[in-house]
């Protein structure tokens, strides 16, 4: 398929996804702004009033919202990409087109919603920053790093979506398994809490006598292999502190994201020719 036709197909699939989602709704795509705005004010009120003192952070509500929105894009992108190939079964048997475009369109549609949320987060962070600092001369410069963080975020989401959508063609339990894993992943990612240091792992392991004494370091290393931990950390550096994201977490998130994209697209393309007969 020619590149222009590939782009047209992708645009049509993304448009179809968005139209189906907002069909017969009064506000249409404006729900992309209304829903995250409502979530922001609800979470800000509830967690700001109840948990700010407990966590000892005046910016806890923003820390929470950034983590929630970032993880929601990842979780919704992956879980909707997993069944995308199977759901297009009749189309696969009738039309020849790059199968890669199916999960790509799903993740792209979810990314449009996330970018709308990201705009709201940016406005909220500026409103939070101004009363404290009074001005934003150099505070806007780190925003230039947002595209790099989003690239890592999008790459990892698409890569895992491609990988699991391939598995789902041959083993339909993959969709249910993915939903379960994403739920566990949510609580293993610093969404509701800041990234824990090694000392916290050591304290936790000490309270669990059933685990070996040296397991804290192992859990700490495993924890920092979670790309979403680094991606959320980078978003928070930019949006909460208005500072450049730390090099190590950003590099780790970008490396793991691009690595997952490479593995996912390789596995997907190697098996794409079998999809129609399996479905």
Image (spheres, rainbow, N blue to C red):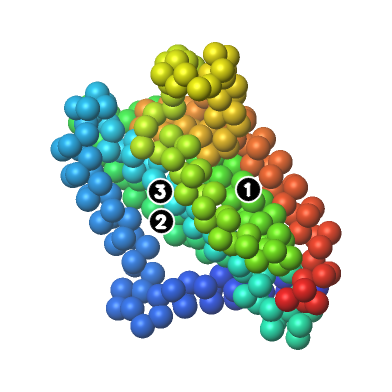
Mark 1 or mark 3: which comes first in sequence? Answer: 3
x and y, in percent, of residue 131 in the image = 20, 31
Residue at the farthest front position: 210
Can you say whether 220 is above or below 18 in the image? above
- Left or right, 71 with respect to 124, comes to right
Secondary structure type for disc 1: helix
Quadrant where the N terminus is found in the figure: bottom right
In the picture, the disc for residue 116 is 2
User: Mark 1 to mark 2: distance in Å?
Assistant: 18 Å
Tell me whether circle 1 and circle 2 mark residues in contact (CB < 8 Å): no
Looking at the image, is mark 2 or mark 3 earlier in the sequence? 3
Q: Quarter of the image holding residue 6?
A: bottom right
Q: Can you give x and y, in whole percent of width and height, for residue 30 in the image? A: 34, 67
Q: Are marks 1 and 3 in contact (CB under 8 Å)?
A: no
Task: Quote the CA–CA distance across marks 1 and 3.
Answer: 17 Å
Q: Nearer the viewer, residue 15 or 220?
A: 220
The residue nearer to you, when weighing 224 against 97, is 224
Please tell me whether mark 1 or mark 2 is closer to you in this view: 1
Residue 174 in the image: state x and y as whole percent: 63, 60
| Pointer 1 residue | 155
Residue at 49% over, 44% down: 184
Asked if one can make out residue 235 in the rendered structure from this viewpoint, the answer is no
Q: Is residue 129 above or below residue 113?
A: above
Task: Judge whether 269 appears above or below 253 on screen.
Answer: below
Q: Residues within 10 Å of mark 2 (few under 14, many from 20)?
A: some
Task: Quadrant for residue 161, please give it.
Answer: bottom right
Residue of label 3: 69
Can you tell which of label 2 and label 3 is closer to the viewer? Answer: 3
State the SS at label 3. helix
């Amino acid at each position: 398929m020619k590149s222009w036709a590939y782009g047209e197909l992708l645009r049509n699939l993304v448009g179809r996804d968005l139209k189906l989602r907002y069909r017969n709704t009064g506000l249409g795509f404006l729900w992309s702004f209304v829903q995250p705005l409502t979530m922001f004010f609800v979470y800000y009120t509830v967690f700001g009033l109840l948990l700010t003192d407990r966590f000892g952070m005046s910016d806890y509500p923003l820390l929470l919202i950034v983590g929630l929105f970032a993880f929601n894009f990842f979780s919704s992108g992956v879980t909707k990409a997993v069944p995308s190939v199977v759901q297009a079964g009749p189309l696969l048997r009738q039309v020849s087109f790059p199968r890669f475009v199916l999960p790509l369109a799903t993740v792209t549609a979810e990314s449009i919603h996330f970018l709308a949320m990201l705009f709201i987060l940016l406005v909220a962070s500026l409103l939070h920053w101004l009363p404290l600092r009074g001005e934003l001369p150099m505070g806007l410069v780190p925003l230039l790093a947002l595209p790099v963080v989003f690239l890592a975020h999008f790459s990892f989401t698409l890569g895992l979506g491609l990988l699991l959508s391939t598995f789902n063609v041959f083993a339909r339990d993959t969709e249910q398994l993915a939903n379960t894993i994403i739920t566990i992943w949510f609580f293993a990612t610093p969404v509701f809490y800041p990234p824990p240091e090694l000392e916290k792992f050591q304290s936790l392991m000490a309270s669990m006598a059933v685990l070996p004494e040296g397991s804290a370091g192992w859990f700490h290393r495993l924890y920092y292999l979670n790309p979403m931990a680094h991606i959320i950390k980078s978003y928070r550096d930019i949006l909460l502190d208005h500072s450049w994201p730390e090099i190590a977490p950003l590099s780790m998130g970008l490396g793991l994201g691009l690595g997952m994209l490479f593995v996912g697209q390789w596995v997907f393309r190697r098996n794409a020719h079998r999809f129609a007969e399996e479905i």
